[in-house]
Amino acid sequence: MRLVHTLWRFTPLLLLAVVWEAVSRLGLVSEFALPPFSDVVTAFSRLADEGLWEHTAQSLYRGATGFACAVIVGVLAGVLMAWYRPVHILVNPLLRCLYPMPKSALIPLTIMWIGLGDNSKITLIFIGCLLPVVLSAFNAARGVDQVLIWSARSMGAREREVLWEVVVPAAMPEILSGIRISLALAFILLVSGELIIANNGIGYLIDILGEGGDYAGMFAGVVTISTIGFFADQGYVALTRRILAWRE
Amino acid sequence: MTSRTPPAETPSSGGISIRSVCHEYRPARGRPVLALDNIDLEINDREFVAILGPSGCGKSTLLYLLGGFMPLQQGGISVGGRDITGPGPDRGIVFQNFALFPWKTVRQNILYGLEKQRLPKDERERTTRHFIDMVHLTGFEDSYPSQLSGGMKQRVAIARTLAINPDTLLMDEPFGALDAQTRSLMQEELLAIWNRSPTTVVFVTHDVREAVLLADRVVVMTARPGRVKKIIDTRFEGGMNAEIAKSRPFLDRVDEIWDLVREEAIVAGSAGAG
C-alpha cells in the first residue's frame, strides 16, 4: 500500500520523462537542444563507468566543506551579533557590503587569490552561504521572547547559559530555514564555480561534455547534480522536522 | 481553602521593602513615559499581596523591578533585607503567557531550574516528580508545551517556579490568559498550595474578585503614571473559603475596590482617547 502510494507520487516525474522522450523523438524540438531521455539514460550509465562518481564526489566534498563552515561560522556570528553589541558593530558593516554583491562575481577573484583547486570553490561557497545563515541567526536571536530570557535568569542561569540554552534553541526554527536557503545556494555556487574554471567536479564535467558536443552526456550530468540537490533538500527538510518535533 | 494563617515553622524570607521607586520608559524616539511615580510599599514576610490597576498603570513594571529584570532608576527595593541587583532564584516569577521553553518537555522544563541550582541528580528527579504530581500533570511528563492546554501550561509554569523553592513568588497576571472555569480552579489550587507552604507573594492582576479572593492586602494603583492609590485589607474572619467568597462582606469588599479601580480605568481610558 505504501509502495503504491510512493509510486503514485512519482507519476508526474514519469510523465515528464515520457513527454521528454516524445517531443525529442518526434522532432518537436531539436535533438541538440533536448536529447531524448533514453539517450540521456544511456549516457548516464556510460559516464558512470567513466568517472562520473569521482567528479561528483569531488564536487560534494567542496560543497559540503564550504556549506558546513558557513553554517558553523554563520550561526556563531549571527547569535553573537545579537547578544554582544561590539560584535554587532564590528560585523554588521561587513555584512552590509557583502549582502548586495552577486556572489558569482567572486569566482574570478577566488581563483586569482586561492588558485584552481578545491579551496577557491570552498571559499566561494563559504562566503555565499554565510549570509543567509548569519542574517537568519541574527534576526532570530534578536527576536527571542524577552520573558524566556527572564525566566531562565530568574531560575539562576548565567548569561552564557542563557545564550546557549535559551536563545539558540528558541531561535532554532528561523536559523534552520536560513540554512535551507544556503543549502540551495551551495549547489548554485558549486556548479557555477566549476563551470567557469576547474580541473574536475560535476560542473567541469558538464562543461567539457557540452563543449565536446556530447549533449546527452551533458544532460546526464545536469540531471545527476539536480537529483542530488533534490535529495539533499528533502533530507534536510526531514532533519528539520525531527529537530523541531516540539513544534507539533 | 482553609485558614491562611502561616505555620510558624517555615523559615522567614523577611518581606519586601519598596522605597520611593520611580521608573521611566525612554523610547528611542518620542517622549519618555513615566510608568511609576514614587511608589512606597512594605510587604510582610509570607504575606500575599495583590497589585490591582488599569492596564498601563505600571503594575507589571513594578513586578519586573522586583524580579531584577530592569535596572532600578530611582528609589530602592530590598527583598529579605537585601537590595536587588539582578534576577535570582530567591524570587520566582510566573508570567501571563507561561514563558515555558517550548523545546523542552514538561519534565525538562521543571528540571531546568533545579539543574541551575546544582542539586544532585536524584534530588532533582525526586523534586520534579513531586511537583508534577502536585499540579496534577502525571502522565504528561514527556509532553511538549505545544501539546498542552493553557491551564496545563500555566500549571507547569507554576510547578517550575515553585520547584526551585523561592522565598518570594512574583506573579504577573498568571491566570489572565485562561478561560473562566480554568482560572477559578487555578485560583483554588494556588490558595491550597500557598496554605500548605506560605511564601511572600506579589500577584499582579486586573481582576478585582481574584485579588480579593487570593490576597491578604490589595494595592490599588492609579492610571499612568502609576502611584499607590489605596491599600485595602482583604483578610476575612476564619480565612478564605468557598462560603466566604459568596458572603455579603466579601462581595461588598469586591464592590468597594471595583469602584476605586473603575475611577482609574476611566482616567486611563480618557487619557488614551485624548
Image (cartoon, grey):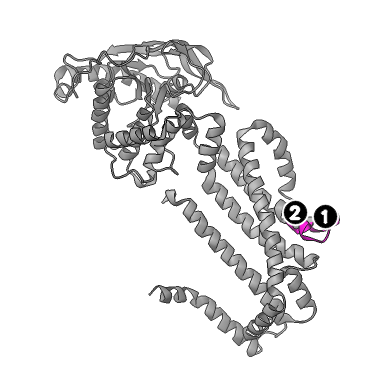
Q: Is residue A81 visible?
A: yes
Per the image, label 1 sits on a secondary structure element best described as: helix
Q: Which residue is mark 2?
A: A123
- In the rendered structure, are the residues bearing label 1 and label 2 in contact, judged by CB atoms less than 8 Å apart? yes
Q: Magenta part of the protein: which range?
A: A107-123
Specify the subunit that label 2 lies on: A
Judge whether B48 appears above or below B190 on screen. above
- Residue A121 lies within the magenta run: yes
Per the image, label 2 sits on a secondary structure element best described as: helix
Local packing at callout 2 (Cα closer than 10 Å; few below 14, some 14-19, many 20+) is many
x, y percent for residue B270: 41, 23
Tell me which residue sits at (19%, 24%) in the image.
Answer: B1
Tell me which residue sits at (71%, 56%) in the image.
Answer: A125
x, y percent for residue B265: 36, 22
Local packing at callout 1 (Cα closer than 10 Å; few below 14, some 14-19, many 20+) is some
Q: Which mark is residue A114?
A: 1
Q: Earlier in the sequence, mark 1 or mark 2?
A: 1
The residue under label 1 is which amino acid type? Ile
Tell me which residue sits at (39%, 11%) in the image.
Answer: B41
Left-right relation of A247 to B136 = right
Give the quarter of the figure containing the N terminus of chain A.
Answer: bottom left
Foreground of the two, A94 or B113: B113
Main secondary structure along the magenta-highlighted residues: helix
The residue under label 2 is which amino acid type? Thr
x, y percent for residue A228: 61, 68
